[in-house]
Image (cartoon, rainbow, N blue to C red):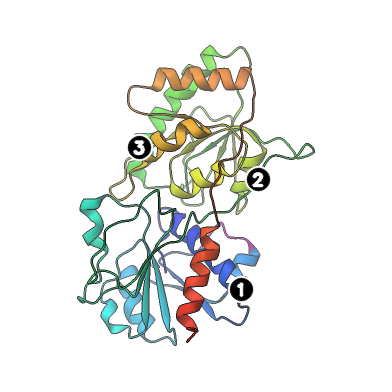
């Protein structure tokens, strides 16, 4: 279960885990519940689910209780009325500011049977009390690992990715910053810029003024990242990790989120992937981007450790069929 009206991060993480569950146990019956028609999934990922249920978030618990589900998995979301579901409950909890953790407690006073944290133990492990979670597991990074660009792969050029779409309020704050960045970088470059904006399915068709081309990456944004010369991307969990697994240099741009500290992510991953656009660093970011375009160079993929989706699938299947 996950929300997907304004973005697709929850849906992507769920699909990554579901693919590993289906690979390990093809007989497992999986259902997807979300609050908007799912998008940007591969046909093979859609095929993992025997049914897809679209309903309002406020109705999910009551709809869930009427299904034959034995384990419910929620991705970084609250589930009002979860107490009506009598099966096991799992929360996939993406890194969250400590003062917002209480938001993700079950509202019936019971503990989650398991909380899966989609990162390495060394990165973040929240101190959850036993009345919050009976079990806490850091599974590792849950992402599609794409690898380095092949010598015969088509070049995707300079790619701008602004996430699954976001809200109008987010775009109103982000787009002026990106336009200013691109104008400055173009002015400093000795070569022509051709910016290709990957327009997410929740973007409502709002394009960037400085974009020269708009395209729909569909479910293949990760391979577009690999084929690009350079990527300018927001600092969402999935975007950063999919970029990290490639050898493509990237400029990471954080956007303000109440439950997702993108500035901290840009500060951590920016130097590893290329550059992180932090406050008062617009000038330096434009200089970095212009130099990267004028003097193209690749980097080494980041070491992300063991596949977190595989570990999450293992945990879920153990809950379905516990070994005595």
Q: Nearer the viewer, residue 231 or 94?
A: 94
Give percent across and percent down for residue 283.
Answer: 41, 17
Disc 3 crowd, CA 10 A, few/some/many (<14, 14-19, 20+): many
Residue 214 falls in image quadrant? top right
Left or right of residue 160: residue 151: right
Give percent across and percent down for residue 322.
Answer: 47, 83
Q: Is residue 103 visible?
A: yes
Q: Residue at x 41, y 58 (%)?
A: 5
Left or right of residue 28: residue 149: right
| Local secondary structure at mark 1 | helix
Q: Nearer the viewer, mark 1 or mark 3?
A: 1
Q: Which residue is mark 3?
A: 263
Give percent across and percent down for residue 84.
Answer: 28, 83
Q: Earlier in the sequence, mark 1 or mark 3?
A: 1
Confirm whether the magenta stretch covers residue 39.
yes
Q: Is residue 219 above or below residue 234?
A: below
Disc 2 crowd, CA 10 A, few/some/many (<14, 14-19, 20+): many
Instruction: Specify the quadrant that holds the N terminus.
Output: bottom left
Instruction: Kindly identify which numbered label has been placed on residue 147.
Output: 2
How many marks overall? 3
Q: Which residue is mark 1?
A: 24
Q: Residue at x 61, y 21 (%)?
A: 293
Q: Nearer the viewer, residue 115 or 177?
A: 115
Magenta-colored span: 38-42
């Amino acid at each position: 279960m996950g929300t997907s009206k304004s973005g697709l991060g929850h849906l992507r993480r769920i699909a990554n885990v579901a693919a590993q569950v289906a690979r390990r146990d093809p007989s497992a019956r999986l259902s997807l519940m979300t609050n908007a028609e799912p998008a940007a999934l591969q046909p093979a990922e859609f095929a993992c689910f025997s049914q897809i249920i679209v309903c309002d978030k406020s109705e999910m618990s009551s709809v869930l209780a009427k299904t034959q589900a034995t384990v419910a998995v929620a991705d970084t979301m609250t589930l009002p009325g979860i107490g009506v579901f009598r099966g096991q409950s799992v929360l996939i909890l993406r890194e969250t500011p400590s003062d917002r953790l209480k938001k993700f407690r079950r509202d019936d006073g019971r503990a989650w049977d398991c909380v899966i944290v989609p990162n390495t133990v060394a990165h973040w492990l929240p101190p959850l009390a036993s009345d919050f979670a009976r079990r806490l597991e850091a599974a590792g990074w849950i992402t599609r690992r794409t690898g380095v660009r092949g010598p015969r792969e088509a070049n995707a050029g300079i790619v701008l990715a602004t996430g699954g779409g976001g809200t109008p309020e987010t775009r109103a704050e982000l787009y002026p910053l990106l336009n200013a960045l691109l104008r400055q970088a173009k002015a400093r470059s000795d070569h022509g810029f051709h910016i290709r904006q990957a327009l997410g399915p929740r973007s409502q068709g709002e394009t960037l003024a400085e974009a020269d081309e708009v395209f729909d990456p569909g479910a293949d944004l990760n391979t577009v990242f690999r084929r690009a010369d350079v990527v300018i991307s927001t600092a969402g969990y999935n975007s950063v990790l999919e970029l990290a697994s490639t050898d493509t240099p990237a400029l990471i741009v954080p956007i303000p989120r109440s439950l997702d500290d993108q500035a901290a992510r840009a500060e951590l991953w920016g130097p590893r992937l290329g550059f992180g656009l932090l406050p008062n660093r617009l000038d330096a970011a434009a200089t970095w981007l212009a130099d990267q375009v004028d003097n193209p160079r690749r980097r080494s993929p980041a070491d992300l450790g063991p596949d977190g989706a595989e570990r999450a699938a293992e945990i879920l299947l153990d809950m379905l069929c516990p070994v005595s």
